[in-house]
Image: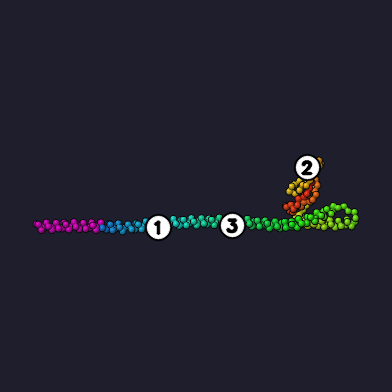
């Protein structure tokens, strides 16, 4: 009887040891699994952080590139506007040169034209002098015709309202039969080239 009891006790003890060993192995396995899972989670977390940092850097680089592109576009637009203005200015200057290319020559000839006018207003009796004046008148009219071909014309003054743009008043008169501020007399003819005054007329104006 005693032997059977001892055998049962031993069997019971062995079973308890097996259970304890199994539990220990289970706990060890769980610990190992937990330890194995921790690095994986850490790696995943680090990878996520790295990806976030990379995205932030990429977004920053994209913003910088966008800003640089905008600055270059603005500069290009300014350069284009400057070039357009320069082209318009050059076109206007060329047009003005073509339009007023005869102005310098006309200005130089005005003194000679004035001398012709004074000579033609001279009263002469001799036939030779009259013939000479006729020849001078032909030259004078030829010059005026050449002026007209280049868009240069005399400014009408006498009987016209005084206009400081076209007239230069050097004297005032008092004529009750003429309205105020009207040109009474012209001392020197004025000339206009298309829309530009070459020389204003020298006049006498009614008060």
From which residue to which does the magenta span run? 1-27
Residue 23 rendering spot, x and y as whole percentages = 23, 56
Element carrying mark 2: loop
Residue occupying the point 50% across, 57% down: 65
Q: Categorize mark 1 by other alpha carbons within 10 Å: few (<14), some (14-19), many (20+).
A: few
Which corner quadrant holds the C terminus? top right
- Point out the frontmost of discs 2 and 3: 2
Instruction: Give the crowd class for mark 2: few <14, some 14-19, many >=20 residues within 10 Å.
Output: some
Q: Secondary structure at mark 1?
A: helix
Labels 1 and 3: the sequence-earlier one: 1
Q: In the shown orientation, is residue 79 left or right of residue 127?
A: left
> Which of marks 1 and 2 precedes in the sequence?
1
Residue 182 image position (x, y, % from top left) = 78, 44
Q: Are marks 2 and 3 in contact (CB under 8 Å)?
A: no
Q: Residue at x 70, y 56 (%)?
A: 96
Q: Whole-percent x and y of residue 183? A: 78, 46
Residue 79 is tagged as: 3
Are the residues at dot 1 and dot 3 in contact (C-beta closer than 8 Å)?
no
Answer with left or right where residue 33 lies relative to residue 174.
Answer: left
Colouring convention used in this rendered image of the protein: rainbow
Residue denoted by label 2 = 207
Question: Distance between the Cα atoms at labels 2 and 3?
Answer: 56 Å
Can residue 135 be seen?
A: yes
Q: Quadrant of residue 120?
A: bottom right
Residue under label 1: 50
Q: Residue at x 38, y 58 (%)?
A: 47
Query: On the rendered structure, is 114 left or right of 23?
Result: right
């Amino acid at each position: 009887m005693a032997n059977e009891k001892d055998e049962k006790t031993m069997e019971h003890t062995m079973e308890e040891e097996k259970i304890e060993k199994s539990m220990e192995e289970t706990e060890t396995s769980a610990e190992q699994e937990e330890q194995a899972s921790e690095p994986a989670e850490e790696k995943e977390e680090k990878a996520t952080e790295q990806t976030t940092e990379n995205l932030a850097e990429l977004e920053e680089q994209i913003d910088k590139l966008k800003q640089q592109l905008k600055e270059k576009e603005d500069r290009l637009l300014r350069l284009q506007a400057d070039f357009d203005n320069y082209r318009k200015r050059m076109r206007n200057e060329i047009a003005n040169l073509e339009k007023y290319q005869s102005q310098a020559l006309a200005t130089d000839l005005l003194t000679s034209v004035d001398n012709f006018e004074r000579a033609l207003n001279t009263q002469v009796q001799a036939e030779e002098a009259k013939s000479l004046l006729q020849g001078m008148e032909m030259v004078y009219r030829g010059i005026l015709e050449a002026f007209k071909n280049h868009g240069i014309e005399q400014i009408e003054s006498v009987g016209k309202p005084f206009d400081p743009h076209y007239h230069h008043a050097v004297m005032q008169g008092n004529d009750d039969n003429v309205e105020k501020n009207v040109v009474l007399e012209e001392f020197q003819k004025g000339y206009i080239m298309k829309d530009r005054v070459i020389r204003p007329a020298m006049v006498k104006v009614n008060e």
